[in-house]
Image (spheres, grey):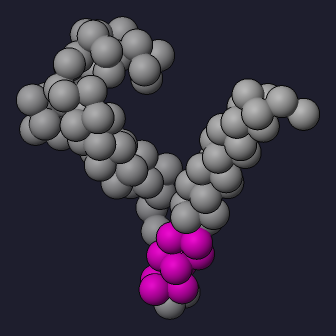
């Protein structure tokens, strides 16, 4: 196998690991959340989860793109206006 193919494989493996790592972190945090509830039944869990995750996610993406809305919206695959609205919602603008 050429060195270039070996590097590509390594990059693909890194991306796969990152996806698995994120999924594992979400799973572990969700399990801990339910354990901490100690039997209480939460309401509106989906909206709560999305708000808890979306704000830090957008903050990191914006930092990564040096707060360039065009680059960030392309990276996220969403419209610039949508991104601006989300940033405003979380006071990240």
Q: Classify residue 20 as left or right of residue 82.
A: right
Q: Which residues are magenta?
A: 28-37
| Chief secondary structure of the magenta portion | helix
Residue at left 46%, top 83%? 37
Q: Residue furthest bottom?
A: 38
Q: Classify residue 56 as left or right of residue 25.
A: left
- Image quadrant where residue 89 sits: top left
In the depicted structure, whether residue 69 falls above or below residue 91: above
State which quarter of the image contains the C terminus.
Answer: top left
Q: Nearer the viewer, residue 10 or 91?
A: 10
Q: Nearer the viewer, residue 6 or 53?
A: 6
Q: Nearer the viewer, residue 27 or 40?
A: 27
Q: Say how many tags the image has.
A: 0
Residue 36 located within the stretch drawn in magenta? yes
Residue at left 22%, top 37%? 63
Q: Tell me if I can see residue 82 in this picture.
A: no
State which quarter of the image contains the N terminus.
Answer: top right
Residue at left 27%, top 27%? 65
In the depicted structure, whether residue 76 falls above or below residue 26: above
In the depicted structure, whether residue 91 falls above or below residue 32: above
Residue at left 17%, top 26%? 67
In the depicted structure, whether residue 36 falls above or below residue 87: below
Q: Position of residue 9 (x, y in %)?
A: 77, 37
Q: Residue furthest right?
A: 1
Q: Tell me if I can see residue 42 in this picture.
A: yes
Residue 88 located within the stretch drawn in magenta? no
Q: Nearer the viewer, residue 87 or 46?
A: 87
- Image quadrant where residue 82 sits: top left
């Amino acid at each position: 196998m050429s060195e270039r193919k070996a590097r590509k494989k390594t990059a693909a493996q890194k991306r796969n690991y990152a996806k698995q790592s994120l999924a594992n972190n979400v799973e572990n945090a969700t399990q801990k959340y339910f354990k901490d509830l100690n039997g209480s039944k939460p309401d509106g869990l989906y909206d709560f989860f999305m708000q808890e995750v979306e704000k830090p996610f957008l903050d990191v993406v914006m930092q990564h793109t040096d707060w360039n809305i065009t680059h960030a919206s392309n990276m996220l695959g969403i419209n610039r206006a949508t991104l601006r609205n989300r940033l405003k919602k979380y006071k990240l603008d």
